[in-house]
Amino acid sequence: MLGGCVDVMLGHRETMVLLLRDASVYGSVYGDETTELMSRGAGITSRAVELLAGPDPDWRGRVRAAQAFATDPIGHLPDVPDDELREELLRGASAILGSTGAAGPR
């Protein structure tokens, strides 16, 4: 199930970034105050991930930091190839859930 969810998110990366990181999407529906709050929240989340990842992390460290903070590693790492990011996301999710096995079946 988790692999399927990751596949859908990776298959629609640009849409996921728009929905999860672009506060202007919510402005027309919820108003300017919500847009401002969403923008501030996205900034706080980005900074928290930076701090959790530590100094000079590689992209895998940034994936773990985003997962630990329960945020969107897909939107934070647009430069990482889908197949590598998928494997790392599932490896991290397995670690968080205490499961064995890395990426599981495709």
Image (cartoon, helix red, strand yellow):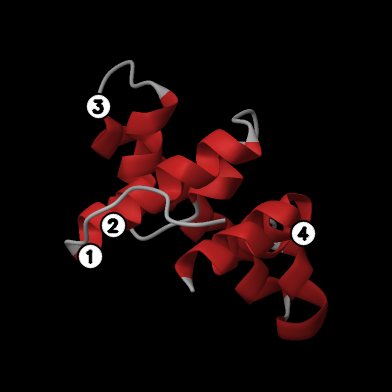
From this viewpoint, which residue is outermost toward the bottom? 29
Measure the alpha-carbon separation of dots 2 and 1: 5 Å
> Is residue 29 left or right of 84 when viewed as pictured?
right
Question: Height in image: 3 above or below 31?
Answer: above
**Residue 69 visible:** no
* Dots 3, 2 in contact, CB < 8 A: no
In the rendered structure, find residue 97 and report the number of the disc placed on it.
1
In the rendered structure, find residue 94 and report the number of the disc placed on it.
2
SS category of the residue bearing label 3: loop
* Mark found first going from the N terminus, 1 or 4: 4
- Where does the image place residue 99, in percent across and percent down from the top left? 21, 61
Query: In this figure, which residue is indicated by the disc labeled 4?
Result: 15
* Dots 3, 1 in contact, CB < 8 A: no
Residues 85 and 31: in front is 85
SS category of the residue bearing label 1: helix
In the rendered structure, find residue 54 and report the number of the disc placed on it.
3
Question: Height in image: 28 above or below 83?
Answer: below
Badge 2, how many Cα within 10 Å: few under 14, some, many 20+? some
- Where does the image place residue 59, in percent across and percent down from the top left? 44, 27
What residue type is disc 4 on? Thr
Badge 1, how many Cα within 10 Å: few under 14, some, many 20+? few
From this viewpoint, which residue is outermost toward the left? 98
SS category of the residue bearing label 2: helix
What residue type is disc 1 on? Leu
Measure the alpha-carbon separation of dots 3 and 1: 23 Å
| Residue 104, quarter of picture | bottom left
Please tell me which residue is depicted at 49% across the width and 57% down the height of the picture.
105
